[in-house]
Amino acid sequence: MRGEEGNLPEDGGWRMEDGMSKQREAGRLGKSLTIFGLRLLVTPKLVFLLKYKSSYGFSSRTRPRSQRTDLQREEYTHKYKQIRSRFSDKVVLAASVLSKSGKVLVSRQFVDMTRIRIEGLLAAFPKLVGTGKQHTYVETENVRYVYQPIEALYLLLVTNKQSNILEDLETLRLLSKLVPEYCYSLDEEGICKTAFELIFAFDEVICLGHKENVTVAQVKQYCEMESHEEKLHKLVLQSKINETKDVMKRKASEIDKSKIDKNKGDKGGFMSMGSGRIESSFSDISISSSGSGFGSSSGLGLTTDVDSFSTKSKGRQLSSATAPPKGLGMQLGKSQKTNQFLESLKAEGELIVEDVQPRAGQARVAAAAPTDPITLTAEEKLNVTLKRDGGISNFDVQGTLSLQILNQEDALIQVQIETGGNPGILFKTHPNMNKELFSNENILGLKDPNRPFPTGSAGDAAGVGLLKWRMQSADESMVPLTINCWPSVSGNETYVSIEYEASAMFDLRNVVIYVPLPALREAPNVRQIDGEWRYDSRNSVLEWSILLIDNSNRSGSMEFVVPPADSSVFFPISVRFSATSTYSDLKVVNIIPLRGGGAAPPKFSQRTNLITENYQVV
Amino acid sequence: MEKSCTLLIHFDKGTPAIANEIKEALEGNDVPAKIDAMKKAVMLLLNGETLPQLFITIVRYVLPSEDHTVQKLLLLYLEITEKTDLKGRILPEMILICQNLRNNLQHPNEYIRGVTLRFLCRLNETEIIELLFPSVLQNLEHRHPFIRRNAILAVMSIYKLPQGEQLLVDAPETIEKVLSTEQDPSAKRNAFLMLFNCAHDRAINYLLTHVDRVSEWGELLQMVVLELIRKVCRTNHGEKGKYIKIIISLLNAPSTAVIYECAGTLVSLSSAPTAIRAAANTYCQLLLSQSDNNVKLIVLDRLNELKSSHRDIMVDLIMDVLRALSSPNLDIQRKTLDIVLELVTPRNINEVVLLLKKEVMKTQSGELEKNGEYRQMLIQAIHSCAIKFPEVASTVVHLMMDFLGDSNVASAIDVIVFVREIIETNPKLRVSIITRLLDTFYQIRAARVCSCALWIIGEYCLSPSEVESGIATIKQCLGELPFYSVSEEAEATDASKKTPQSNSITISSRRPAILADGTYATQSAASETAFSPPTIVQGSLTSGNLRSLLLTGDFFLTAVVACTLTKLVLRLEEVQPSKVEVNRATTQALLIFVSMLQLGQSPVLPHPIDNDSCDRIVLCIRLLCNTGDEIRKIWLQSCRQSFVKMLSEKQLQETEELKAKAQVSHAQPDDLIDFYHLKSRKGMSQLELEDEVQDDLKRATGEFVKDADDANKLNRILQLTGFSDPVYAEAYVTIHHYDIVLDITVINRTRETLQNLCLELATMGDLKLVERPQNYTLAPESSKQIKANIKVSSTETGVIFGNIVYETSNVLERTVVVLNDIHIDIMDYISPAVCTDTAFRTMWAEFEWENKVAVNTVIKNEKEFLDHIIKSTNMKCLTAPSALDGECGFLAANLYAKSVFGEDALVNVSIEKQADGKLSGYIRIRSKTQGIALSLGDKITLKQKGGS
């Protein structure tokens, strides 16, 4: 199976499905290791079960699915249903918080019951609870409610009548102490805001309907989920990454040197370029060393160690599924293995480098979480309001350039940019920026050259804003997409034809045009369309989506028919799209490191994005 | 099968979250926004949106998140999201989550592991779980108890799935090993629970090997042990002996919850007197030691159950139970008294009554606000004791009569009613009661008590001396005559001008009250306060309350006084040989009557005498002037006879009820038959006969649905479309407690395939559709069963509308077939119920909604009309049948019913036969909610016409 690993798709879930269908075609037991497109960790026991228990109709995998009849399914579910409710006979059915007026704010059920049943029980409660009573339980034919009023709320346990009242009261007391811990204000709003936190807390107190022996402090601790082990684990991981990185750097500079030696006297111009390339690929490795790189190449069966640490990117997840059948290989923090791992890493340093050339597929997935040490994002947001009979009532572009640096070491830099020279655009730098440097040389650097840029982990979305710009215009030719909507009533129906026209400036992606419709029972009758449509009946909006508008389809149209309606119903039409080029045409040319003259400039990645914030035809 | 629902969260529909927004937030890197979006996604999902496109987004962007809260929310999302397709097959994309779950199961954070394991407990899809269980098993040995705890439960849940036994063949063995080394009490409990559920024998084995240490185990574990014992004994009666010892040892456990459970288990295991006694004793101890009212009440319930099954044992414990009276809670006191009253025997009656008397005395000294009600309860208890055991009546009746002057009118009325009954049923006590009553008469403050006391005096003063002292007492209480002197008239008119305000108050506070027979009577609210106009001649101090009551204008009481005096004078004629005495008494009485009439017509009183009372007094005057045997017989004998008749009827009714009750518990056609020679049923425990506990849970989760008989089913079929429609539909409506299930059969009558056939329903009234409709495809001339659930939250007539919408292949348009409306009948929700007269009257006064329906019917007979109304409204007539006897041209009756939601419906029918033979009058409906009053009114208007 190791041989197959190379073919394994590295990116998200989509290709898994391919694998799945492939598997269906194969449909053989022997291949069960890649069942459902996933590499499974198959223990000997599972293999045993697969082989020997198949006669019991054990799994769909041993027989084609279609052979399992619905009747059998019903039988299973019936059996299951009977058993599940018999874990124990004296249990808490549900813990709920209701408002005094009887509105169910939160309810957590601990046994299987249908929605209609629990809603019925909770709806009956306010009618049953009387006023002026000195006890706080109500019994009906089938259930018992034990409750406690808390300000404007009822905290309520629904139990069966055989349930132990003394235990239930204790549970209720505990819950009543917990609720104020999580809710700032004990009213409807407060509860609704913290509904999920309450559910988590309830889960800690009652497990499968049984009371747990916990205190308020313990529940809080459980819910906070502060784990010493996790911290330790992260530290170990970090130190490992750093260590590896050091090794990498050393190796890289060695290679660098040898290459310089080789190329000496040949072509001086190539030198820096070549070294730059290698350097950048090294730094890439150092980041992704926790990632996918090793899975495909390590022959030592250590993959599992690495994989279990990784939770960051989708691509890595998949590779961890390729874990060899080591059974217990998932245990963490085994120092021996870690050392072994590092040693092997050192030994095979170069080999790894060869394998981990960044791939296109990976880059696509990784777009969400940057893996480059430095990321620069130029983003422009469009705020456009077009009049329905033509003309612009508002056209506004707001752009930002933000910088995101992963590691502290790379933070002492300056950024050189290049703008498209659009005269309508005014740039504004962050107050901490050196303004002169920017106006003279188009270089963005901090006023104090010794101060590093703030760094942030991959989790932070925004990064640091360096530059802002703005453009306003009344020129209709600047508008990337114009929309023309012609509703006309004819007899018993309204014909609406819409066309779009895109300017040649941009290639627009994921264009969605939202046309509001009068409230309809059914979807409108779309006569003709370029692209695809969808009817959102809940908001009664027709969504016209075009995946990509480029030179092949700069204009397009659509026509649909609805029952007679006023033409103003179809406005405002709102539009969403994105594009990869911007008005400002801002580009980052270079990154200039300020420290250590010898070191090559760090690798950076650049993203350019034009998105719509508010794009409407009114 | 319906999906089970694991959580509910209130969702404000005002701010609908757009799926796209959620998607965007999920794709972003902002953790708080992500958390927020996940919450929204979960709420939307709960609200019935399916959001199919969101799943992939979540898989791509949420699964990798490192944030703990996001991971927990993800688990919630997975918990509620649809994991199977329509046919119950697992959706292929669910496999994508497995990897994440597996990573979580190996996460360095112990809490992430724990919550993931807990999530597995709720997962039913074997296909997903079987990929995960190696990781689950690893967690069994984790260092952290939090993980072990949940891992054990996960193993249990997996093992319990269909085919689970095959997936985890050696799970019981593993868990047993875990159990033997486990230290954490919670984990230990879970392990034992797992064995208990999955491998009985191992659990028993473990229990028996550690039998000596059971009492040292944790509270949680002990509870499971008790449950195990109960279950084992059910399947294996022979081994009962082994376990009783364990239970007995646990009876001394430090945890009260365990003790309570022990007692319950003991009762269900054995019916041996020792065991029952031990259990009852335990309950009594809990009753005294626990201060929580809830516990006390529930323990009293348990005692009540014991009482019905083991009365002889409970009789011995009666005094222990009575000690619960020391609690100041009225509900507890009431429940205690109820239990005790059924346990009194000739042997313990004296003790009980002594204690009750002591309690009554205590209420006099204490200043607690609820004392009045408590005293009333005690008086009623003593009353029923005295009826059951007449010999104790003598010891209590005098004590009780001290309360005639009680400021709490209700308890005073109870006392006087009690005295009235005792004096009739206990002739020996008559003389002493009468003397006592005459002595205390002046203390009586309330008009209603007073009139009852006067009736007793009038009926039961038999000897000449009694009659004379009776007349004297009344005269004394009335004070000097006249009540009103002409000389002061001028002044009085001035005064009456001065006090118009008070007059208006009195008038405004007058409101109709219903008498016990259901008729309306005018009652003056001011009559019970000692209110008197200043200008009226006040009697001397000795005259007591009677005079002041009369002077407030209580003319009903005036008439009662007149009748009593007439009766006494008539009796005096019989027993007093001296004609002179009789004549003197007669004239004095006549003088009193005349003064009363004069008072009634004087302007000083807020309102003049009403015609009824006036007629009655005039009748008394005429009677005394012109006596006859016929009249005398009516006045002196018939009155009493009708009272005796009422008493005997009441008794008869009680014994009949008792008989009916007894019959229920005896004669079941499928009961076991006891053979004298074989082991009798009495030796068997409750458990062997039936397992109540197990059914209890099923009932609570709503799994128990009684099979209605099929014949009734057919009556409920409604045709929804016509026979010539392309789609024929008919519905079978089942009405459950809180929901209505529509079973709709849809038949395609065309030769085309109907696509996207959808049953759209809308509701009016307090009904709510539970699920969104689904689309179906219907082959030519085939049929389909569609189920729809509708939630009901109060009793109200509701209507369900609907359409069937479909497409055919050749026409693009959707076709709509409108369905007949389905009307939900209020009658399905109300059922006849019984309440006491007093309860009925308080509710009648309290309830806000009244619907008055004028009688309009072709029925000529009052009784027949009443029966018709009862039948068509499904209510219970509270008015006794004897009170409805006879032909007098009018009829008044009270009807009562309760809805399944616990709402009360009150109806009063008052009809009179007109001269032309038609019936006229009103039917008044009162209820707390508008819905009932309206719907019931509509129903009556619709049905009252009768004839068919």
Image (cartoon, rainbow, N blue to C red):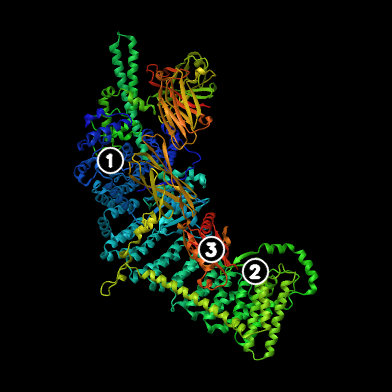
Quarter residue B605 falls in: bottom right
The chain that hosts pointer 3 is B
Look at mark 3 in the image and give the residue it sits on: B858
Earlier residue among tags 2 and 3: 2
Quarter residue B847 falls in: bottom right
Classify B295 as above or below A115: below
Estimate the x, y position of residue B864 in percent, counting from the top left: 51, 67
The chain that hosts pointer 1 is B
Discs 3 and 1 share one subunit: yes
The nearer-to-camera label among 2 and 3 is: 3
**Which mark is on residue B528?**
2
Task: Please rate how many residues cluster around mark 2, counting C-alpha atoms within 10 Å: few if below 14, some from 14 to 19, many from 20.
Answer: some
**Which mark is on residue B131?**
1
Quarter residue A230 falls in: top left
Residue B835 seen from this side: no
In the rendered image, the quadrant that contains the N terminus of chain A is top left
Task: Please rate how many residues cluster around mark 1, counting C-alpha atoms within 10 Å: few if below 14, some from 14 to 19, many from 20.
Answer: some
Q: Foreground: A315 or B587? A: B587
